[in-house]
Image (cartoon, rainbow, N blue to C red):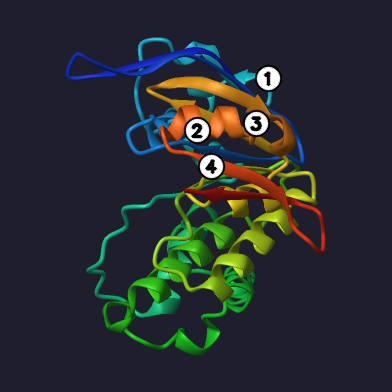
Amino acid sequence: MIKGYQINYQNQNVSILKGIDVEVGYGEFLAIVGPNGAGKSSLLNVLANEIKTDKKQHILFKDKILTDWKLEVLSKHKAKFSQHNSQDIPLLVKDVVMMGRYPYFHSQPNSEDFKCAENAMTDTDIIHLQNRDYNSLSGGEKQRVHLARVLAQLDNDVTHRLLFLDEPLNNLDVKHQYKTLELIKKLTQKKNTTIVVLHDLNLAAHFADKILLMESGKVLSYGSPEEVFTQEMISKAYQFPCTICKHPVNQETMILFG
């Protein structure tokens, strides 16, 4: 689905990403994890074609060089949720969500666009907020509005769509953290691909198919949650002691720090 080879990135002569290889297939949910400053968001932005590097030809999307895609076509195949969204948008919630449908119409949205936006608002539990001013919402509500926007963008008949999310759980309560990850999981189960930057290792272990653990701009470990989330690897990445145990009910991996 998307492949990156020997990805390197520098910013103001500071090396951010160092020789990263990554490959995510159809129907896979990849969680990128690691301590602050590890390069997680930078890697996501490079893969999403939002950071220009000297060797973009090393990134392939659907076996095609990423920079060879026309933007108007690419926008129907992939969407990205950013952790830094504007907090001041003088629009109604439903109009912000409709921004996700911009690739599909030129002047006015049609009935299909309205339907897609409504479905996305329902899925993200903001349909009751659709006529509210965006600026009147809480941080968590704004977060869900932007999630609805990117989901509306990918509501189409394209096969094997790609969704990037950079820390989508910020400001969300526990209920909506789980509902958000369940939505993402549901999308990948339809043979789409999702790459998500997460901080909560236990949620990553519960929902993701693959984990990419980063440290200092490099890949420290890459594989299934069981392969990556070992006491040795996590303690090395975070430089903090941890314990790995099994949930007493479902036997899933649990990570306890301290």
Q: Which label belongs to residue 147?
A: none
Q: Amino acid at mark 2?
A: Ser
Q: What residue did someone put label 4 on?
A: 242
Residue 158 percent location from the top left of the image: 71, 46
| Sequence-first tag of 4 and 1 | 1
As measured in the structure, the alpha-carbon distance from the residue carrying label 4 to the one carrying label 3 is 14 Å
Viewport quadrant of the N terminus: top right
Question: In the rendered view, does 11 fall on the left or right side of 158?
Answer: left
User: Tag 3: residue type?
Assistant: Val
Q: Which mark is residue 235?
A: 2
Q: Examine the rendering and report whether any part of residue 47 can be seen.
A: no
Mark 4–mark 2 Cα distance, whole angstroms, equals 6 Å
Looking at numbered disc 4 in the image, what kind of residue is underneath it? Cys
Q: Earlier in the sequence, mark 4 or mark 3?
A: 3
Q: Nearer the viewer, residue 159 or 135?
A: 135
Q: At numbered mark 4, what does the secondary structure look like: helix, strand or loop?
A: strand
Q: Amino acid at mark 1?
A: Asp
Mark 1–mark 2 distance (CA, rounded to whole Å): 36 Å
Q: Earlier in the sequence, mark 4 or mark 2?
A: 2
Q: Badge 1 local density, few (<14 within 10 Å), some, or many (20+)?
A: few
Q: Find disc 3 in the rendering and name its residue.
A: 228
Mark 4 or 3: in front is 4
Q: Earlier in the sequence, mark 1 or mark 2?
A: 1
Viewer-nearest of labels 1 and 2? 2
**Closer to us: 217 or 123:** 217
Query: Residue 215's spot in the image, x, y percent?
Result: 43, 25
Q: Earlier in the sequence, mark 3 or mark 2?
A: 3
Q: Are marks 3 and 2 in contact (CB under 8 Å)?
A: no
Residue 226's quadrant in the figure? top right
Determine which of the numbered discs, if any, sits on residue 63 in the image: 1
Tell me where residue 209 sits by quadrant. Answer: top right
**Callout 3: helix, strand or loop?**
helix
